[in-house]
Image (tube, coloured by chain):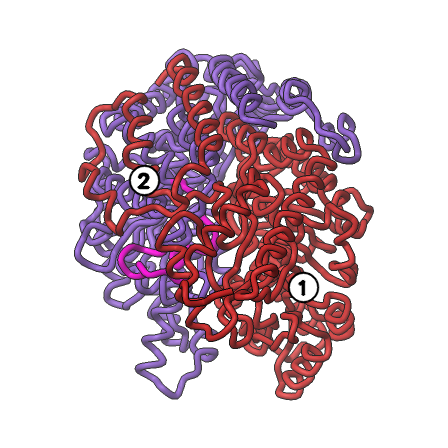
Chain colours: A purple, B red
Amino acid sequence: MNSNEFREFGKAMVDYIADYIDNVRDRNVIPSVSPGYLEKEMPQEAPVDGERWEDVLKDIDKLIMPGVTHWQSPKFHAYFPTSNSFPGVVGEMLCAGIGCLGFSWMTSPACTELEVIAMNWLGKLLGLPEEFLNCSEGPGGGVIQGTASEATLVGLLAAKERVVRLFTKTYPSLTEGDIKSKLVAYTSDQANSSVEKAGILASVPMVHLPSDSNGSLRGDVLREAIEKDKGAGLIPCYVVATLGTTGTCAFDNLEELGVVCNDENVWLHVDAAYAGAAFVCPEYRYLMKGIELSDSFNFNPHKWMLVNFDCSAMWVKDARYLVEAFNVDRIYLQHQHEGSAPDYRHWQIPLGRRFRALKLWFVLRIYGAEGIRRHIRHQIQLAKHFEDLVNMDPRFEVNTSSMGLVCFRLQGDNELTQQLLDKINAAKRIYVIPCYIREKFVIRFAICSRITTTEDINFSWAEIVSHVSPHLTN
Amino acid sequence: MNSNEFREFGKAMVDYIADYIDNVRDRNVIPSVSPGYLEKEMPQEAPVDGERWEDVLKDIDKLIMPGVTHWQSPKFHAYFPTSNSFPGVVGEMLCAGIGCLGFSWMTSPACTELEVIAMNWLGKLLGLPEEFLNCSEGPGGGVIQGTASEATLVGLLAAKERVVRLFTKTYPSLTEGDIKSKLVAYTSDQANSSVEKAGILASVPMVHLPSDSNGSLRGDVLREAIEKDKGAGLIPCYVVATLGTTGTCAFDNLEELGVVCNDENVWLHVDAAYAGAAFVCPEYRYLMKGIELSDSFNFNPHKWMLVNFDCSAMWVKDARYLVEAFNVDRIYLQHQHEGSAPDYRHWQIPLGRRFRALKLWFVLRIYGAEGIRRHIRHQIQLAKHFEDLVNMDPRFEVNTSSMGLVCFRLQGDNELTQQLLDKINAAKRIYVIPCYIREKFVIRFAICSRITTTEDINFSWAEIVSHVSPHLTN
């Protein structure tokens, strides 16, 4: 394909994407296909000769779209949002077009430097403590990871490095293997599955501590667990606090946890994957009180802040632990400017990294701080509107409401809500998923699409109500 | 930004990318900026109000491009290629436009199913053994990872899982901690830095075994190391063989290593990050003889096979070890079709994953098998042409030539070649990096850009020769 054909194909794709977003609310949000649907429609092998792009584009509608779950539909209320914005898409295009890698400053200075700058802008926008920023005097800084899963794992590996260094110094008789075999980490029983997975990947047991009745992990629970484990000869090294849990968007008590972690010299990582975006609005920053006591902080602009996946923003107070944990150098990676800018390969799991700062920079500039705040506040208003609708119907109860997420259920046995959920999703017009709050089975209703309106919420609520069994009268 | 503005901005970006690639050879491949250049040009904070996209686009030329190292330039000969093709760019656009996540079948059936199909097509195109493919009867299958680094780590974690299961069954008195503390893995002294990093991340010592005079790791060296370590009470669990090393594109002897690994019940992972793409051409498949003895195989279509970064193709013979190592389930991740298609979140480190199969599918269809083979063969011919040019100049010697990579140096002391390298890169017109072959300092010359022509190679050679000190006469 030459560049003239690309101009045609690329522009046709721009129109395709614009049309897709313009009309996405008219599609069933859940596809009607059965497993294996695509295999039946596809050849067994790649074509021998190249095909026309027009034929590939036709197949998007014919073969791909029937199997897509439409995360950008205003009728998608499952999980949490996955960002999609026009500036974000164009940023991703340019990233692909330039096609550079930025594993060291030298391999594309702009790639590293724009990331440093965009992460400083973003950190300031959130009101993060100065010491987390690259532009501070100290060893702190920000980096774009692929996902919150990776950020949690990177934090854990840095914490391991720190504690191993500390213990080998303090107790020279201990081997690294001895120390590693005694490590233990903590999180709440509400933490995302990726936190448990990080523990598995890093071979550090991840203890799930009980959250309080609001789904919040508290300091005294952590302190008790640490003291008990230390008494048993274990070495506590890492705590993952969640700001905005996956189940109900609950907030751990960072201030209490931070004090315990600082007392015990345990690395505190804050996973604010979804809710962190709300800190662009000063009125929500009280929820991250205590952030200055943490060692690392992560949130996903690719969830709720209009930057296309993948863009997970992580800041650390002291990047030297990352670099020391990950530094594996070779002559072909060396360059004369080492040390003058972060060589981000030492801040992450993979070696290769693309120019993701472009899409973050595009979003920050084209929306502006106020545009992003408007987006967050509007989505929270929509959730409030949904909450009001539920509250007005006495057959239902609202169990939690936090940020853009409302958890609700039918009054009575769990089975009623389970049946309702099954009917809603079987109809495929809106998409919701469940969770448990203690023993209660609830439906999570998240505001996900950027283009959601009050009318969309009214539609979704009417859809929910339409599936309530008629014998459940008001 | 509404969809009409996106149509304008997106199409302007398509033209920008087309123009960039059309004219990339006219730019200095290495930028002239110093560390910190961008900070001086940028505001300290994100704008309060949104800016016009036209202004952002202007700043690409003004601020970003001066700091880009042009990996897509035909004058870029450093590292290995990072793919960039027009179908790949458009595939990435659509992935961003749809903006779905595919961590389970249900979250977007097309995302999982197209990945299964494209990985089957690709595996067949490479001539991989049937048992690696999803379409085989057994538990094998393919998955798209972000990078070869991740694939190596995923393989290691699966190998750990397998050996821990085996040993706890055979020796019930051993704890998991006991077993893990005795694990050891092996690779060659030529392996990429990411292999050593995988060992660090997974807390398994990665032993670097000496390669032979061709840079190839041989079976007897591995067998000896395993026997010695077993004698010392260690548990060998993982071997990473490289097909196409970063330094010289050397190939480990897979057939010999495979026999040893099978004898010893050690997981054999094959890292063919760069050179694996050549196996689309049957005439190069002899270099992967023994592949049927391996447990996992990985190569990067995003390196040499025209799919934009990131797209790292990994196949495993038995995916159950991955799933068992990584499976961390929650009620909100469950769906009624579990087991009928791979839930790829269990095959990788992160939870989230985007629709990367689109760009792979676009490339396979629009190039076709023959188009991809033509690309590979053409690039190897260009390397051969460069090798011939070096060989015709008696001041130089060719040290290795393999696939699209030629290593060469000036006759005489290393210092001469080091000085030459410094001069070449200081001039910024072409970009090359060094490596050591045993005690010899050599320059690596890789064919990287998709658009490279014979004239480009002649230009690069003339540029190299122009920096040879005049007192080195023919």
The residue at the point 44 percent across, 52 percent down is B431
Q: Which residue is mark 1?
A: B251
Q: CA distance from mark 1 to mark 2?
A: 38 Å
State whether discs 1 and 2 lie on one chain. yes
Give A325 or B259, whichever is nearer the viewer.
Answer: B259
Question: Which label's residue is closer to the chain start, 1 or 2?
Answer: 2
Q: Residues within 10 Å of mark 1 (few under 14, many from 20)?
A: many
Residue B125 is situated, as x and y percent measured from the top left of the image, at 75, 43
Q: Main secondary structure of the magenta part?
A: loop
CB-based contact (under 8 Å), mark 1 and mark 2: no
Q: Which residue is mark 2?
A: B66
Q: Is residue A89 above or below residue B447?
A: above
Kindly state the secondary structure of the residue where label 2 is placed: helix
Q: Is residue B85 above or below residue A339?
A: above
- Quadrant of the rendered image containing residue A269: bottom left
Give A44 or B215, whichever is nearer the viewer.
Answer: B215
Kindly state the secondary structure of the residue where label 1 is placed: loop
The residue at the point 39 percent across, 88 percent down is A173
* Image position of B336 (left or right of B419): right
Q: Residues within 10 Å of mark 2 (few under 14, many from 20)?
A: many
* Image position of B8 (left or right of B210): left
The residue at the point 65 percent across, 54 percent down is B403
Residues drawn in magenta: A333-356
* Image position of B207 (left or right of A43): left
Q: Quick one: quadrant of the N terminus of chain B?
A: top left
- Is A84 within the magenta? no
